[in-house]
Image (spheres, grey):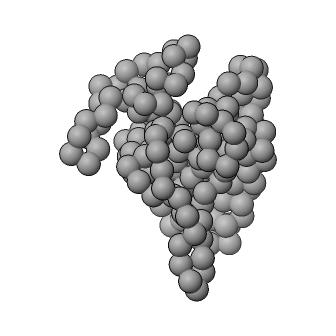
Amino acid sequence: VTVLFADIKGFTSLCHQIPPTRVMHFLNHLYSRLDTLLDVYGVYKVETIGDCYMVAGGLMTRDSDGFMAVRGPDSVDELHAAKASRVLLPTTRRPVEMRIGLHSGAVMSGIVGAKMPRFCLFGDTVNTASRMESTCTPGAIHVSAATRALLPEEEWEPTGGVQVGGWCVYVCMR
């Protein structure tokens, strides 16, 4: 399974500058565009919390390594990336910049809760993917060595590494 976290640069500041209804409209517009890509790439939307968007590949479909989502022709990937990046920040009218982090590995999943049951993912893979996102430069993609190994033909720029839970994970930036 490959887990992806995406987060909007400057979201907290945006929330202080515009009314909550405009924030909701903006998020709905952005997430609706991202949601249209879920079926195209065969990934499952796990959840959104504020400006954090979490998806998993190889979880609900037959995809041995969770990377069906990035094996399409480059022109198709670029078209879809352009579609999502056409969303403009309501404060500056500039394209949204996101931090994206990915990690691949085993996860535990299940329905949790009695009052509002929710499908959730757990484990080091989820935590590491989140850490890849939080340490990423806006506008870039941060991946772990495990994810990088699944895409050997991609060109990656090493970033050195990042400390995750007491152990170091080699990461790369695309």
Q: 10 or 61: which is nearer to us?
A: 61
Residue placed furthest toward the left: 166
Residue 128 in the image: x percent, y percent? Answer: 39, 45
Quick check: can you spot residue 47?
yes
Residue at image coords 53%, 59%: 109
Indicate the quadrant where residue 86 lies.
top right
Residue at image coords 47%, 19%: 156
Residue at image coords 57%, 33%: 65
Determine whether 38 is above or below 120 in the image.
above
Residue at image coords 54%, 40%: 2
Residue 15 in the image: x percent, y percent? Answer: 54, 65
Determine whether 72 is above or below 25 in the image.
above
Residue 85 in the image: x percent, y percent? Answer: 68, 39
Indicate the quadrant where residue 81 lies.
top right
Residue 31 in the image: x percent, y percent? Answer: 69, 54
Determine whether 141 is above or below 151 in the image.
below
